[in-house]
Amino acid sequence: MHVNGIGIGRGTAIGPVLRMPEPLAEPAEIPSRANPAVDYERVAVALAETAADLMALGARAGGEAKDVLDAQALMAEDPAVIEDIRERIDSGRTAERAVFEAFRSYQYVLELAGGVMAGRAADLRDVAQRVIAHLLGVSVPGVPRSDEPFVLIAQDLAPADTAMLDLTKVLALVTRDGGPTSHTAILARAKSIVAIVGAAGSDQLTDGTPVIVDAAAGTVITDPSSDEIATARERASRGVEDAPLTPGTLADGTPITLLANVGSPNEAAAAVALGAEGVGLFRTEFLFLDAQHAPSIDAQREQYIALLRAFPRQKVVVRVLDAGADKQLGFLGHTHEENPALGRRGIRALRDSEQVLRDQLQALAEADAATDAELWVMAPMVADVEETNYFIELGRELGLKTMGVTLEVPSAALLADQIVGLTDFVSIGTNDLTQYTLAADRMLGAVSRYQDPWHPAVLRLIKLIGDAGATSGRPVGVCGEAAADPLLAVVLVGLGATDLSMTATALADVRAELKRHTIEDARDLARRALGATSAAAARQVVAAAVLG
Ligand code: PEP
Ligand code: MG
């Protein structure tokens, strides 16, 4: 059996499947026929076992994860919750329903409180799921643990789960949902996890089934033959081919700076080793996905210094916190939204918590003063001139020298002629630009086919930005996943991109492709793509022109 999806990267992995248990269904609201005293005893045991499990997990994980898990263990032993559950059992609820309702009532309270408290509501939900799983005698939801390496199969995976995966055990990741530019996919790419997303049919795979995960082909092969395994092993051992680490240039010598997307200073060394000429996108929110409180200026400054030191006299573009949608930060006061991708995201959320933004800009200015990298700072999700001016003026007030914006909201791309000249630089976020232009949630596997930056509607918006960059003399970067597609990278240059930033592992292929084309070739390819009527047609017309 073959299961197909969208491969992330080009790796191959071989191993047995282990499924991530689905979230538990809400326990039915039916009258209990059990003896309340017996049910109460079962709940007490389940709560104690849950607390013990969480403490043990924390002890194994260490660091910040331990703090989070210890706090969850305390929630499972909170006397007020236990009393609430007892009252609900006494009034006729089943044990499972009583646990569900008691935890839910506390979740509501936390969600209403907003801010850091709202972030804790998800932790409470997780504790409740664990307790109910104990009561039902089923697997606890969450990433499974195993002493043997395995291929993780999940409906979807939160970015925080992906960031915490034990890569000595998880050989590959296959999700039924999720698109190629979801943050889980981005993290998988950055961590070189072999992954396939949007793999409909992966929910049919059963624990222990041997599989080959071939990300380049976007295929999971079940029960492979020994020949298939031998071929896959050979491919897996070949790894990334060595290529000279020269700066990015076109065939005619036009420089195109090739930069890395990073989510932590720890990724800097690997990016340098893969020939990154600097950083084109540092997603600072990845540092704080688990943070309970806004990070201090001191703590932030140390992280920024660590990154800037890895790139002496080179450009490092830092994006201020882009929270919201699939990256909720409790300390920015996120509460439930029906359509979070259209909600309080990026600069919108930061403006509502201006002190958090000021502190981050302050920490960046201090890190800049302490190092000799070229620090550029940009805001996510700006929609128009007013938001651009707000951010740039604030950055200048706090002493930052090079200020720009990410262009990823279609309104901002349409107004590029008004916006670009106000900045020192812009960077195009093709992931969001595609999601918003095609009105297709980048998190949703069911619409992942729309998440294709080759779409001429997206390319036309990029052209508006490229033209505005040329008119105003401002650099135009691309930091979305589109830059990692070698042929599309050439088209982006033809549309006016002056630098490209991507997962470092993609640099070699993009560098090699750029070398094959002059700026005139790139513009010609861009013209062809702009005239296509679909993403597939654009890709095809460019591939045909290149391959002859
Ligand atoms: C983008 O939207 O293309 C981008 C680079 O930012 P993120 O993927 O973090 O939203
Ligand atoms: Mg974005």
Image: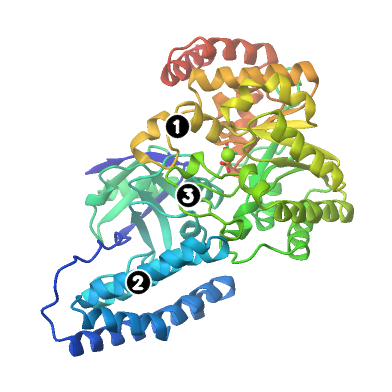
Which residue is denoted by mark 3 in the rendering?
A: 184
Q: For marks 3 and 2, give the CA distance.
A: 24 Å
What residue sits right under mark 1 in the picture?
451
- Decide: few, some or many residues near mark 2? Use Cα within 10 Å; few <14, some 14-19, many ≥20: many
Q: Secondary structure at mark 1?
A: loop
Of the two numbered discs 3 and 1 on the same chain, state the one appearing first in sequence.
3
Of residues 86 and 388, the one nearer the viewer is: 86
Q: Which residue is mark 2?
A: 128
Provide residue 221's location: percent of width, then percent of height: 28, 45
SS at circle 3: helix
**Badge 2 amino acid:** Ala
Measured Cα–Cα span from mark 2 to mark 1: 35 Å
Q: Residue at x 46, y 81 (%)?
A: 74
The local crowd at label 1, few if under 14, some if 14 to 19, many if 20 or more residues have their Cα within 10 Å, is many
3D distance between C-alphas at marks 3 and 1: 15 Å
Residue 420 in the image: state x and y as whole percent: 74, 25
Q: What's the residue type where badge 3 is placed?
A: Thr
Q: Amino acid at mark 1?
A: Gln
Note whether 113 is above or below 187 in the view shown.
Answer: below
Residue 41 occupies quadrant: bottom left
Observer-side mark, 2 or 1, equals 2
Picture quadrant of residue 495: top right
Name the residue rendered at 47%, 61% in the picture.
Answer: 111
Ligand 2 image position (quadrant): top right
Compared to 352, does 474 lie above or below?
A: above
